[in-house]
């Protein structure tokens, strides 16, 4: 059963997010918000780690397919990034993603590669209306370096959006970590 805490809705990039103005030119920018129950953690690091550890299994299958398709182009694969993550300090990576910045309301993750750079933001905020509660916004911005990057982002953008929404819904369904 879907309830108000399981709806991941598209929103504008939050002006207070560290990813909103990170690149001069952006080839993809999107954000999805989901309501957080009052009992959920406020810690963006905890929430980011939870989201990426609770993803639906089909996302791993998609990443495996992506790895096969991009390896011939010399792009970083999720397997290569997992090896890097295994050797890194917990504070340096969340899953396969590098931590670029963190504060009490937001963690910015991402990766740079020869075809594109991207940043993900996990931002915890409180709506202006007192009865609206808190929300978590997952934002993505991508800057492409070349034609390969632009073609790549055109191909994966629909999958990216499905993955983000499914990841947020799955985390809500499993149950957010408590404060």
Image (cartoon, helix red, strand yellow):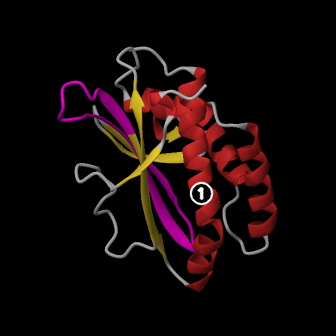
Image-based side of 41 in relation to 98, left or right: left
Residues 13 and 52: in front is 13
Q: How many labels were placed on the picture?
A: 1
Q: Quadrant of residue 101?
A: top left
Query: Is 129 a magenta residue?
Result: yes
Residue found 67% across the figure and 68% down from its top: 75
Viewer can see residue 88: no
The quarter of the image holding the C terminus is top left
Read off the magenta span.
Answer: 109-136
**Magenta stretch, overall SS:** strand
Dot 1 lies on which element?
Answer: helix
Image-based side of 69 in relation to 132, left or right: right
Q: Is residue 145 above or below residue 51?
A: below
Identify the residue under disc 1. 160
Residue found 54% across the figure and 83% down from its top: 146
Location of residue 76 in the rendering, given as x and y in whole percent from the top left corner: 66, 62
Query: Is 19 a magenta residue?
Result: no
Residue found 39% across the figure and 21% down from its top: 37
Residue found 61% across the figure and 52% down from its top: 162
Q: Is residue 22 above or below residue 62?
A: below
Image-based side of 21 in relation to 84, left or right: left
């Amino acid at each position: 059963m879907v309830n108000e805490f399981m709806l991941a809705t598209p929103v504008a990039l939050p002006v207070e997010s560290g990813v909103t103005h990170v690149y001069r030119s952006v080839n993809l920018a999107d954000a999805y918000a989901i309501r957080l129950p009052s009992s959920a953690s406020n810690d963006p690091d905890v929430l980011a780690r939870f989201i990426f550890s609770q993803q639906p299994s089909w996302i791993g299958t998609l990443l495996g397919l992506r790895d096969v398709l991009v390896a011939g182009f010399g792009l970083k694969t999720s397997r290569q990034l997992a090896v890097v993550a295994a050797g890194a300090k917990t504070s340096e990576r969340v899953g396969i993603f590098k931590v670029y910045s963190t504060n009490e309301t937001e963690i910015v993750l991402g990766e740079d590669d020869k075809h594109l750079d991207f940043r993900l933001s996990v931002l915890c905020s409180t709506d202006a209306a007192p009865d609206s509660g808190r929300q978590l916004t997952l934002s993505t911005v991508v800057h492409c370096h070349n034609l390969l990057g632009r073609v790549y982002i055109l191909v994966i953008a629909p999958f990216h959006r499905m993955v983000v929404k499914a990841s947020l819904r799955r985390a809500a369904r499993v149950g957010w970590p408590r404060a």
